[in-house]
Image (spheres, rainbow, N blue to C red):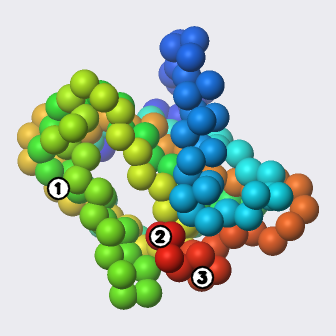
């Protein structure tokens, strides 16, 4: 797996910020984040998984104060396998993004306290942007414990 920190690449699509803002609004609502909380998606890394790459089951550590979740945006890329599996309290959600990622972006979001893994990429390359979901300002930090219906 190849990783790039945000200072080593640029997103030059002029509509990306607006698209990300719309996407994160959907993500926060889908995760059950209370509407009065101020939250931000902060770019963490660009990841490129090649054939045979995977990520073992783990929980995300808090990479910055207020981090409560992760947003993974799979950019248009052709690959097989590479399913993202998220588990919490005996429930499992599997995101199979390879089949529809060749010409479009896919995303998945989950709370940091959920165990997750990336299954082995069977062929091609899985290219994705990873964002930390961060609560800023006052209010309690959301968690899957509080919103178990929305992994």
Residue found farthest to the left: 123
* Residue 125 is at least partly visible in this image: no
- Residue 7 in sight in this render: yes
Q: CA distance from mark 3 to mark 1?
A: 28 Å
Number of residues whose C-alpha sits closer than 10 Å to that of mark 3, classed few (under 14), some (14–19) or many (20 or more): some
The answer to whether 18 appears left or right of 127 in the picture is: right
Q: Around disc 1, counting alpha carbons within 10 Å, would you say few (fewer than 14), some (14 to 19), or many (20 or more)? A: some
Give the residue furthest to the right. 138
Q: Nearer the viewer, mark 3 or mark 1?
A: 3
Percent of width and height locating residue 130: 49, 44
Task: Give the number of the mark in front: 2 or 1.
Answer: 2
Residue 17 - label: none
**Sequence-wise first label, 2 or 1:** 1
- Rendered view: 3 above or below 139: above
Label whose residue precedes the other's in the sequence (3 or 1): 1
Q: Quadrant of residue 141?
A: bottom right
- The reply to whether dot 3 and dot 1 touch (C-beta < 8 Å) is no
Q: Residue at x 23, y 53 (%)?
A: 96
Work out whether residue 83 or residue 105 is closer to the camera in this orientation and state it: 105
Say which element carries label 2. Answer: loop
Q: Which residue is mark 3?
A: 145
Q: Label 1: state its secondary structure.
A: loop
Q: Position of residue 145 (x, y in %)?
A: 60, 82
Which label is found at residue 151? 2
Q: Looking at the picture, does residue 26 appear above or below residue 8?
A: below
Q: Residue at x 54, y 59 (%)?
A: 30
Q: Which residue is mark 1?
A: 120
Disc 3 secondary structure class: loop
Q: Is residue 92 left or right of residue 23?
A: left
């Amino acid at each position: 797996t190849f990783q790039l920190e945000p200072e080593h690449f640029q997103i030059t699509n002029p509509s990306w910020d607006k698209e990300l803002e719309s996407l994160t609004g959907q993500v926060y609502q889908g995760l059950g984040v209370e509407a009065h909380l101020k939250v931000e998606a902060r770019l963490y890394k660009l990841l490129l998984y090649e054939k045979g790459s995977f990520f073992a089951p783990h929980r995300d550590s808090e990479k910055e104060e207020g981090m409560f979740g992760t947003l993974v945006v799979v950019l248009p890329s052709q690959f097989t396998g590479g399913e993202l599996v998220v588990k919490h309290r005996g429930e499992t959600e599997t995101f199979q993004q390879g089949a529809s990622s060749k010409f479009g972006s896919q995303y998945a979001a989950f709370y940091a306290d959920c165990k997750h893994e990336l299954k082995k990429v069977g062929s091609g390359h899985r290219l994705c942007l990873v964002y930390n979901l961060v609560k800023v300002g006052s209010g309690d930090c959301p968690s899957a414990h509080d919103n178990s219906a929305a992994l």
